[in-house]
Image (cartoon, rainbow, N blue to C red):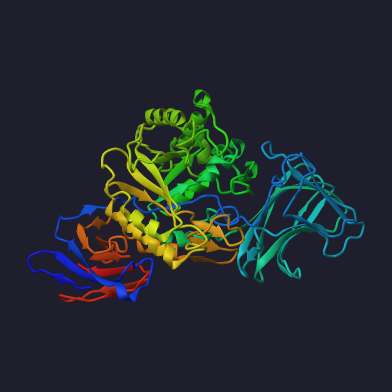
Amino acid sequence: MTFSKASCSSILRLYLIIVSCIAFQCNADHNHTSTLVIDASDGSGRPIPNTLFGIFFEEINHAGTGGLWAELVNNRGFEAGGTKVPSNIDPWTIVGTESSIVVQTELNSCFERNKVALRIDVLCDYCSSDGVGISNPGFWGMNIVEGRKYKVVLFVRSIGPLNMKVSFRKAAGGQILASSNIKGSALEVSKWKRMETTLVAHASSSNSVLTLTTTQKGKIWLDQISAMPLDTFKGHGFRSDLVDMIVQLKPAFLRFPGGCFIEGHRLKNAFRWKDSVGPWEQRPGHFGDVWNYWTDNGFGYFEGLQLAEDIGARPVWVFNNGISHTDEVDTRVIAPFVQEALDGIEFARGTSTSKWGSLRASMGHPQPFDLKYVGVGNEDCEKLNYHGNYLAFYYAIRQAYPDIQIISNCDASVRPLAHPADLYDYHTYPNDARHMFSNAHVFDKTPRHGPKAFVSEYALVGDNQARHGTLLGAVSEAGFLIGLETNSDHVVMASYAPLFVNANDRKWNPDAIVFNSNGAYGTPSYWVQYMFRESNGATFLNSQLQTTDPNSVVASAILLQNPQNKKTYLKIKITPQQSQLQSSGNEMNVIIPPISLTVLDMFR
């Protein structure tokens, strides 16, 4: 690469020496020189939208339940087995023998929206010193760390006095890591009572269980058992290490909660926001039949809005529009779904005295959330009733909230939309790296009038090239993102998908962040997003890439100011090495390695 700066103007000329088809093959016989000419003169660039790169959170791969939401107990309300009792209580198991304890579910909870509770009959007159009871392994093992505190909350009633030991134990061997006793007189627990205790761990294990045991003969009913670490992100219930990885990306927005999750395979199993707000113990939860697991809805609509606020991102709320993967609501009777969406916006933005705003306030957030983007459905454009349903939502929301940006599912990158919208949703999941890379040019010829583009889901997928996350896949995505920067006069938002995967439940591969109970790491795709984290709000510089192989190399250049030292940087991306060149002189030569994203930072 050759760098020169003329004394009378700020025109940068760079010659890139690159292996041919850089992103896809290494053929030393096909080296070629490409020239990137950048105009960095004052006033020559255009602003990149400060919303360009964000994140998309979906309840998939146990991303929230058993992941970002720090709740340790799996199936805390015994609802996952359904309401036909006695029901399955997996993954709960009994502690003790069948001759000493019998457990079964009953419909006698104190909560109207989740009536299942667990009845425990303790049969032993002289129980063992360890007691009998129930045990929960969490989500593939609870991570208990020495010195940390955990709050355990449960709802209980009993015939007779209560003396129950609450413990974290190693799954293998049963060593106690932390324990406390919950006691109540016969009168106190004759009716349902909320009880809580704080456990302080004196040892560590990443494969632990929660046990509730007693040595007293009698009958006990339990419901809504929660165990949460006290060191969550900003005290709001999010797993700190996972949020920290999100924050490192500096996302401009958070799209949530789906994705297919909000549609459901059947409409009866779609995510409905009203079932996910209010006190956690009163939320009924639901079975997500697209990704096939139960969620207690601990991470609900409120939590999505709270997370966006906590990380400094704009919330983008996607709601069901009366359409699932297999059934639809006719437009003539879509009004209740429209009202549900309007109520959801009021929950986020209404005053603390409004019907739904007051519920938000009761949850600890009296001030409105800054909700200005909503998505009407997910990947539903070709469905029979989508256009009619969409218009019903669009006109109702536009009338009530004229400042909200409304996102259509229909692609307008090639032909105009047949309905009004502020943005249109564009998804791309190619399984060939060449295709992903060439998508850098997909918006080059898109008309600049009409709604802007929101690339809300993109990734290279497939078992051949992408697998669980590869450098090849990430570099092809980097080429695509450079194309989005280049076309950021039309593309105003973009996010990778999926964001999270629990290593024990890979419903979808690859993903940006892989985690288990006690650790997490970023795949190459995560680190590519990290390389683009400074682009939001930067200045895109006009440039020309002169190359004999435009399908193998793309490049972009931006100017940005470091908020700490106020210095202006020229950042050049060529599609993980990074070099800061403070005194480059008039020329520099850099050989770009194959299958790489190279970022050059220079002081202007």
User: Which residue is at 88% across, 56% downward?
Assistant: 98
Q: How many marks?
A: 0
Rendered location of residue 423, percent (x, y): 35, 40
Task: Say if residue 434 shows up in the picture.
Answer: yes
Q: Name the residue furthest left.
A: 8
Residue located farthest toward the top when viewing the structure as drawn: 332
Q: Is residue 12 left or right of residue 74?
A: left
Question: Residue 322, position in %: x, y?
Answer: 52, 33
Tell me where residue 74 sits by quadrant.
bottom right
Query: Residue at 72% of width from left, 66% of height from top?
Result: 171
Q: Is residue 127 left or right of residue 356?
A: right
- Pick the front one: 349 or 418: 418
Q: Position of residue 232 (x, y in %)?
A: 54, 58
Q: In the figure, 200 relative to 591: above or below?
A: above
Q: Is residue 384 above or below residue 447?
A: above
Where does the C terminus fall, quadrant-wise? bottom left
Q: Seen in the image, is 25 located left or right of residue 275? A: left
Residue 425 image position (x, y, % from top left): 40, 43
Q: Nearer the viewer, residue 218 or 507?
A: 507
Residue in view at x 84 percent, y 60 percent = 96
- Nearer-the-camera pick, 124 or 536: 536
Task: Identify the residue at the far front of this view.
Answer: 29
172 left or right, relative to 404: right
Residue 363 visible within the image: no
Residue 393 image-quadrant placement: top left
Q: Quadrant of the N terminus?
A: bottom left
